[in-house]
Image (cartoon, rainbow, N blue to C red):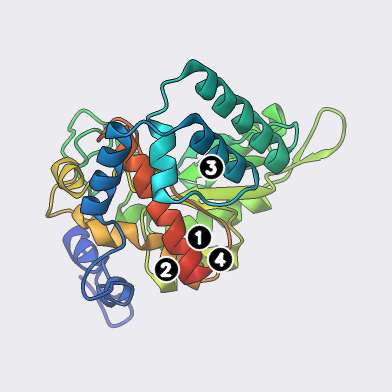
Amino acid sequence: MTTACQPQKMSVKEWCEKRVVQDQVDRYLIDGEDFINEDAINATLADSHNVNAEAAKIREIIAKSESLETLLPDELAALLYVKDPQLIKEMEEAALRIKLKVYDNRIVTFAPLYLSSKCVNGCTYCSFREGNEQSVRRVLTQAEVEREIKTLAGEIGHKRLIVVYGEHPDSGIDYIEETVKTIYAARYKTRKGGTANIRRVNINAAPMSIEELKRLKDVGIGTYQVFQETYNKKMYARMHPPKTIKGNYHWRLYCMHRALEAGIDDVGIGALFGLSDWRFDLMGLIYHTQELEKKLGI
């Protein structure tokens, strides 16, 4: 029974129906089209596959990479079909030099922390999918989160986390906000008498609205990470049932546009290589980076 002081709790179905804010997708489209031009990607890959680029051209592209410039699609495609062992060796050596230039000679570690396994989606490759009746569903309480941080920070010594949430109303923005605060607030004494705590909480969560993403910004998250999984639209539809939230390709594709508009200044994109042709998805990542540079300056 509900009273005027106790609003009726939204059902899971109602929550799902309100997740996609369509005008926060449409505002980014150009004449109803997105920035992933599949015909152009396939044509570029076909051209590079049929025409083996000269060694001098490949070395020019490698040099451009080392200047930390974003490669053009045709330049990336040329690298994807290199077969010459010497050129492959030069690409590997250049990759190491780029790594050292960007990150120096260091390794940054982080611990993954799964806070919820409830999910409303039906991704065919994921054991958390709603239809998997064998999966044990959990959403950690704040006390359980604190115990995890005691182990990760207090005993192991981690300083950074990637915190993972399933897409479900029980682990929606209110829960995410609360758990991030809990993680940052946790302090533990080390054996040497110091204080151990988590300094950076990175988030791997479902796409959100601009309003929700502003709340993530305000609570002080580090990186907001969302993989497109695959940029191939037919394969995406095959892997993600159309009547689920994740079945909306564009809601996911434009989540970083919304995150950057919300003020989050560190975002992570990626693909699950193996769902579709890996070369196509690498090209999709290049298109995605170009779009974010062009539209949002990152």
Q: Residues within 10 Å of mark 4 (few under 14, many from 20)?
A: some
Residue 37 visible in the snapshot? yes
Residue at which label 2 appears: 258
Q: Amino acid at mark 4?
A: Lys
Residue 295: percent from the left, percent from the top?
45, 70
Q: Amino acid at mark 2?
A: Arg
Residue at which label 3 appears: 162
Q: Residue at x 17, y 32 (%)?
A: 133
The quadrant in which residue 18 appears is bottom left
Mark 4 or mark 1: whose residue is earlier in sequence: 1
Q: Quadrant of the C terminus?
A: bottom right
Mark 1 or mark 3: whose residue is earlier in sequence: 3
Q: Do labels 2 and 1 touch, CB within 8 Å?
A: no
Q: Is residue 205 left or right of residue 97?
A: left
In front: 112, or 83?
83
Residue at which label 1 appears: 177
Q: Residue at x 52, y 58 (%)?
A: 178
- Total numbered badges shown on the rendered structure: 4
Q: Nearer the viewer, mark 4 or mark 1?
A: 4
Residue 231 visible in the snapshot? no
Q: Is residue 153 left or right of residue 82?
A: right
Q: Do labels 1 and 3 touch, CB within 8 Å?
A: no
Q: Do labels 4 and 3 touch, CB within 8 Å?
A: no
Q: Amino acid at mark 3?
A: Ile
Mark 2 or mark 4: whose residue is earlier in sequence: 4
In front: 237, or 79?
79
> Gap between marks 2 and 4, in whole Å?
12 Å
